[in-house]
Image (cartoon, grey):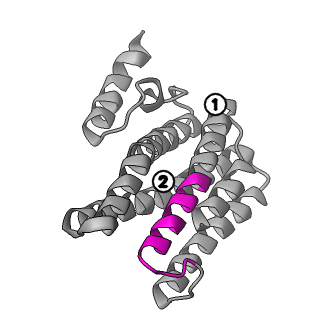
């Protein structure tokens, strides 16, 4: 649920139109992921609104990501704020990716209805989470490169190649140099 807030904050400082469209799509996906995970909570008899110590820590982290984005917007430097937002999205997506890996491991060990619910949730979300992580990392790299006055590739190769795995992300990043030579 906090990821939705991070996306809203990030979208407030996007300069690049392609990135704006991509993050808008990711926000919609994230809203759906919240629904899916709330359903999982119900399947497991958990209250998705319960304030646990772990949830408090995660909420603080999410609030700090939003605050960093908002603070960067106050600088009056739109490109710098966009980079800060992108870095915060990479952090948020890295955590989401890790959470999904944990759910997938739980699905392997669970039995019956719980196993089915976990597997269905992971199947629906996994590819989107992978894409969001690798594409966000590519955008972050290219925004930084551009900010340093060097030739950037926008949209990044990860987006152009529709990257959804670590190995394909590595190949896309390596092929980036060939794109610049053209």
Residue nearest the observer in this picture, 134 or 129 = 129
Residue 107, by quadrant, is bottom left
Residue 18, by quadrant, is top right
Per the model, the C-alpha gap separating discs 2 and 1 is: 17 Å
Q: Is residue 46 magenta?
A: yes
> Mark 1: which secondary structure?
helix
> Residue visible at 43% across and 50% down?
125
Which secondary structure type mostly characterizes the magenta part of the structure?
helix
- The part of the chain drawn in magenta is 31-48
Looking at the picture, how far across and down is residue 49, in whole percent? 60, 80
Looking at the picture, how far across and down is residue 26, in whole percent? 58, 45
> Mark 2: which secondary structure?
helix
Residue placed under numbered mark 1 in the picture:
18
- Is 81 above or below relative to 157? below
Label 2 crowd (10 A; few <14 / some 14-19 / many >=20): many
> Residue visible at 56% across and 39% down?
143
- Is 122 above or below relative to 158? below
């Amino acid at each position: 649920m906090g990821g939705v807030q991070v996306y809203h904050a990030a979208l407030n400082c996007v300069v690049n139109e392609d990135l704006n469209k991509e993050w808008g799509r990711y926000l919609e996906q994230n809203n759906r992921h919240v629904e899916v995970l709330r359903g999982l909570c119900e399947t497991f008899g958990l209250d998705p609104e319960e304030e646990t110590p772990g949830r408090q820590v995660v909420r603080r982290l999410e609030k700090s990501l939003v605050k960093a984005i908002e603070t960067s917007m106050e600088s009056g430097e739109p490109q710098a704020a966009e980079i800060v937002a992108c870095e915060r999205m990479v952090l948020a997506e890295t955590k989401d990716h890790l959470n999904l890996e944990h759910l997938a491991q739980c699905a392997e060990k669970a039995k019956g209805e719980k196993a089915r619910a976990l597997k269905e949730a992971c199947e629906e979300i996994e590819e989107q989470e992978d894409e969001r992580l690798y594409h966000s990392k590519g955008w972050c790299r290219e925004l930084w490169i551009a900010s340093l006055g060097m030739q950037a590739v926008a949209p990044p190769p990860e987006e152009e190649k529709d990257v959804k795995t670590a190995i394909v992300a590595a190949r896309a990043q390596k092929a980036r140099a060939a794109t610049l030579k053209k």
